[in-house]
Image: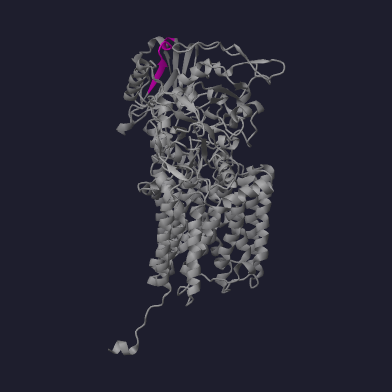
Amino acid sequence: MLSSDRRAIQLRLVALGLGILCWLLAIHTYQALKGDASLPVLVTVSCRKPLERGIIELFQITRSNAVIPVCLEFPRHSRDHQDAIRPSNAFGQQAFQNFALDGLESSLPSTNEPVSLKGVPDKTTIPAWWTAPAMSEQEWQWTIKGSWVRSLRLQVLAGSHRDIESVLIVCGSTSLRIPGNKLTWERNNVAEPIVGHDPPAHQEFFTCNLPWGADCSRSILPRFSGLWNYPGDFGLIRHIFANFAQHPSTWFFVLWGIIALGGLYVRKGRNTPDVGFLAENATLISDSVRGGLPWGAGGFLLVVLAATYLETRDPRYFLQDDNFAIFYPVISRACEIAAVGQFPQWATHQFLGMPLAELGTFALTYPPTYLAYFFSRDVLGDPTWFVDVFCWSHLFLGYWAFFWLLRQEAVIPPLGMCASACWSLCGYALIACRSWYYMSPVFLFVPLLALQLRKLESVQEPFAHSKLQIWRWILATGVLAGLFYHAGNAQMWLYTIQLLGAAILVRGVVCRWSVRRWAILVSAALVASAVAAPLLVPQLLVVSQVQRPPGPHEGIFDGLLCLVLPYPLARAPSPCNWADPTNPHHGQFYFAGGLFTLLWLGCVTWYGLHVRKAASFLASFWQLIAVLALVLALGNVGGLWWLQSRFPIIGQAYHPFKYLPFFHLGALVVGAKFWQHIFIERNGQRPCTLSNTSPEQRQALWITIGMTLVLLVWHVFLVDTCFYQYGDRDYRPLPPRLAELLAPGDCAARIAPITPFRSPAENFVWGLGLDFPMVYGVESLDGYSEFVRQTNEYRRVLDGLTTAPLQTFQKYGVQYVVLHRTAAQPVRSPSWDARWAETQSLFDDFRIRAWCRSQRPAYFDEFVAVFPVEDADPPAFWEEPGLEQAAVCSQSARLTRAVATEKNRVHNVHPRRRPAKFRCPSGAVLVVDCEDKPEGGRLVLNYLWRKGLVATADGHSLPIGSDSWGRTVVSVPAGTREVRVSYQSPWKGGILGGLCLLLLAILAATAAVTPPIRRSDSTRSQ
């Protein structure tokens, strides 16, 4: 009987191995056909004279005949070659090549013409670097890799196509040189719109489809015949098998197979132990933390030492990537608004008025946010420590939450200490939180919520006969889940509800819960919804306007081996494609101690091959969380993520690797309990305590603890990556003259920043792009928040910047255009996928480029140049009788504007803008003094009108609306002394919905705690 059972297990093991083999080959085949197997294509265009970026462009026709632009390669313009584009001395004296561009509407100054630098004692002059050709070269290069090429199209500005000397195309080992006189050009008066790269208006281009003289590979797959860089069918097969043999995921499953074979050999002649340690009810320990406090304190000391080391090595360790460019700037400004006694619902500094609290991503309805900020500002003396205080406080508390969870699961204190340290110091905690501060609350709330659900599952009858315990459980669970929603990331909250909810639902069905237990669970869910509703409803109103494009779906497939092995035993790329690929330590992102993950693999193998016990094992609470999270974290290759992406709301989420901490949660608990079950509990020592272990068991325990801590310390030493790294590590003060120019007195200037989306260049913060204006107290036309950028109100601004950028600057009151040097001379990081974000900017528009070169700057240095915008509308003005100028957004609108302008000219009627006395004391309320306008009138505030804006005067509401440019217009009655405009988020709907849900929760909880009515014997006899 034992032999036949063992033979069946061997057959199942072989079948499982073949299934995994086929799955891996299918994944690599899919990736190869998607473009990974394509040969790299290098295109070099040689010109007779230097041509500027924007004059010559290359477009790729893909396998599906889509036309996409190809990003230029910029030699000598990488992060490692910044000295090549930096001025040669302190005042930037450097010679530039002469350049003349035909077709510009304004005369440009000579590129060698020096511009006087006011304020310099010795009257030193420097050349105007912005007048130099933006990346002028005689030889341009493009590289295409990871994508199929059916054809290439060259586009050149009219007149410059005659300067093309030759085109060299290298594809794999084949090269082709095409003389310029052999190219066939076609005139395009209006270039075809390319997604993300619309050519400027009123430009004439010549296009040429580049010929490929070499024989295109044929394939048995019809859709791949005729592609330039198809390696052939045999080359495709070689690529698939070579990638399969070298990929880390293959070795991960090889390691798993070795564990399976080892487990099969170890249990030869033995019965498979019961899975009750995992699948059945856990033993709840009342004095869980107090009994293991010394061990818990020792592990906590290790976490504190790790934090100290990281902060010493990299001060403000967590202030990187989006924390640096988005979250700290906005949260700091919001907290300063709160410091003057106003709730931060709105700020004037970006997007012509930007909602704050209702977005949710800045955790402004989460009290610890304010505690962390004011602690950093008032106690530490530097508010820029806010992100580190916020993240470390949640990770420290998360350590104790996980330690408490493991003690409740009857895990001995030494193992609990090790697993808790792995939880708080895992790669996801130390790397993901460097980019997104709101990941740190996951490590506190998820263990607490999982523990609450385990309490509901573990007891035989819900909390015996104590109604008070039931009410405590409902309130604690509901408040925890609801408060978690306010902690900054609704996506992680949704994932938590999804995974923990799926696990507890399966357990409820398997264990055949009573109606009373289900009612308790529903009551807690209603309380959680009630607590989250005040933010949930306004956030849904904002998100409903956003048309979110398809996003990245990077999973952890490439990093599976790094789940169990650290560097240098295993290497993997970062799951975020913008990370620096030259850093070899990205694999630490997936690491969480290694040993407990290895134990989880052994546990899955041990019980997964035994059919009779596999169902009970896989249906356990922790195993359900680990398996579901791992499959979802794999991304599209796992199947579940691809299926989930077809659903509304949750299907719009990005980054499947965000499921990784949930896998760590399940794997750490299962691994710790499995070790304890194998080494201690199988010998009949239950309940398990450290005092009743044998010397051999203690030796195994000390070896486990030592190996785990050594690997964890090594892991902490290696963690030095993030998803993107800017060249600046702090917010350097603006140069004094620049600061005085942009922030004179109480009213800050409004700017239009021209910078790339990202850059590793130094002093990039001085360009005042992204959310940096929040730090420096400057108002910006732009910002970095897709939720605000994609709203209907701001799309009007984006349309204006596309059709008439200079007029848009004037109408929206832009006083200065701030140009950063990286817009003219981009600096590249080694990341291939970040090249567009580090290159494109408004400076690519020839109209803006020509305007900047024709202006005399109000300030400039070697990093930035500031140009004043003439005839800009003031921030607040009284609109006198006359015809308002319509916004330019379409051809019909331009015709309307032309007719209106001509009518005004004939009748000598011109709209007048009389500035109003305006002040913005806190950046959240607009105040206009109307004493100089006693008759009232039409008051225009140069901020976008949004539904939440409210205008009041002497306690009375005033009519408020928008003009054709979307600006706020207030009808001011006669006799008004002061007008105040503020923003009110739609809290009322959320609060009302929360109260209704809370009432339902009370009714459901009352029904749950009320014992069923039992009929007496006399009633039954009747």
- Residue visible at 62% across and 34% down? 728
Residue 814 position in % (x across, y down) = 50, 27
- Image height of 919 relative to 43, above or below: below
Q: State the scheme by which the image is colored.
A: one colour
Q: Is there any visible trace of residue 553 in the rendered image?
A: no
Of the pair 395 and 866, the residue shown nearer to us: 866
Q: Is residue 988 visible?
A: yes
The outermost residue toward the right is: 122
Considering every residue shown, the one lying at the far left of the view is 1022
Question: For this rendering, which residue is in front, 749 or 826?
Answer: 749
Residue in the foreground of this view, choosing between 612 and 211:
211
Q: Can you say which quadrant of the picture contains the C terminus?
A: bottom left
Q: Residue 967: give x, y in percent of width and height.
A: 43, 33
Task: State the image coordinates of residue 908 (x, y, percent, origin top left).
Answer: 38, 17
What is the tally of numbered marks visible in this picture?
A: 0
Relative to 7, residue 310 above or below: above
In the picture, the quarter occupied by the N terminus is bottom left
Q: Using the rendered view, name the quadrant where residue 320 is placed.
A: top right
- Residue 502, how many percent across, how many down? 41, 59
Magenta region, residue range: 152-162
Q: Quadrant of residue 290?
A: bottom right
Horizontally, is 129 left or right of 660 in the view? right
Q: Is residue 756 above or below residue 250?
A: above
Q: Is residue 710 magenta?
A: no
Q: Residue at x 52, y 15 (%)?
A: 854
